[in-house]
Image (cartoon, rainbow, N blue to C red):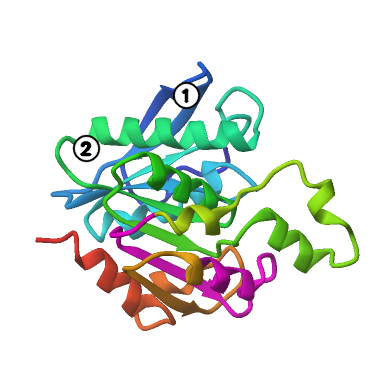
Amino acid sequence: MTTTPARFQVRYQEVQFVAPDGVSLAGWWIPANRPCATVVYCSGNAGNIGHRAHLAPEFYRRGFNLLLWDYRGYGQSSGRPSEKGLYADATAAFDAAEALSGKLPVMVYGHSIGAAVAIQVACERPVAGLVVEAGFASAADLARRRFPRLPSDRLLSVSYDAAARAMTLSGLSKLFGHSLDDDVIPFQSGRILHGAATAPKTFAILAGDHNHASWFSPGAPGNAELEAFLARFKP
């Protein structure tokens, strides 16, 4: 851990919760003043929650509680990561956030591989909204784009088939954002994911690289779409 929300003058509480298979998970509960809803953040592949601490003020000042947490094998969470394990971890994180939130609605936010994880949570839990940043359609689609000469369908041991699951989320409000300059997840894969998702849904074209979404900055690409989506939860 190199950074905490305290660096950004945001108060937080260390929390622990347990996945269905007994794996102990760690995170930070970051409460807002007079919150309107809670966000469960499902991160990308690299780093730990210390690398996402800068998100705390973004949600805090917009009036949203935030649960930042680490998958098994990341940060201070125990266990070893797997596709099935990450899905189980995320549903446990949602349940923990729901318990901390009282009667407030709980939405999920997924970045990169966390988009597939967040979409899986939406299939299993009564999420109030779904935000996807720099997601991909499936592991197979991503592999074909990154390594077109390899028989990726036979080599892959994971699926992360976010597009297939997104097709089942009828009636759930969804916001997708992807940068044309994303250097990790091809823009086209993000568009396929959005195209597969059921309505209602919105797509925002972002600026910047894979790890620096522009839509948190006022007036930047995607900011209007993000603010409009979050405004649905405000009185």
Tell me if mark 1 has few (under 14), some (14-19) or many (20+) residues whose alpha carbon lies within 10 angstroms of its own. Answer: many
Q: Position of residue 13 (x, y in %)?
A: 34, 32
Q: Residue furthest top?
A: 22
Q: Position of residue 116 (x, y in %)?
A: 54, 51
Horizontal arrangement in the rendering, residue 65 relative to residue 67 (left or right): left
Q: Toward the viewer: 185 or 144?
A: 144
Q: Secondary structure at mark 1?
A: loop
Horizontal arrangement in the rendering, residue 157 relative to residue 7 (left or right): right
Horizontal arrangement in the rendering, residue 56 relative to residue 141 (left or right): left
Q: Residue drawn at (60%, 80%), measured in percent from left and top? A: 180
Tell me if mark 2 has few (under 14), some (14-19) or many (20+) residues whose alpha carbon lies within 10 angstroms of its own. Answer: some
Q: Secondary structure at mark 2?
A: helix
Q: Badge 1 is on which residue?
A: 19
Q: Residue drawn at (51%, 46%), measured in percent from left and top? A: 117
Where is 223 relative to 108, above or below? below
- Which amino acid is tagged 2? Ser
- Which amino acid is tagged 1? Ala
Marks 1 and 2, how far apart in space?
Answer: 19 Å
Q: Residue furthest left?
A: 235
Q: Position of residue 97 (x, y in %)?
A: 31, 36
Foreground label between 1 and 2: 1
Q: Which residues make up the magenta segment?
A: 169-193
Q: Position of residue 75 (x, y in %)?
A: 58, 33
Q: Badge 2 is on which residue?
A: 101
Task: Please state the total of marks drawn on the protein image.
Answer: 2
Q: Residue drawn at (57%, 57%), measured in percent from left and top? A: 112
Based on the picture, tell me whether residue 186 belongs to the magenta stretch.
yes
Q: Toward the viewer: 54 or 27?
A: 27
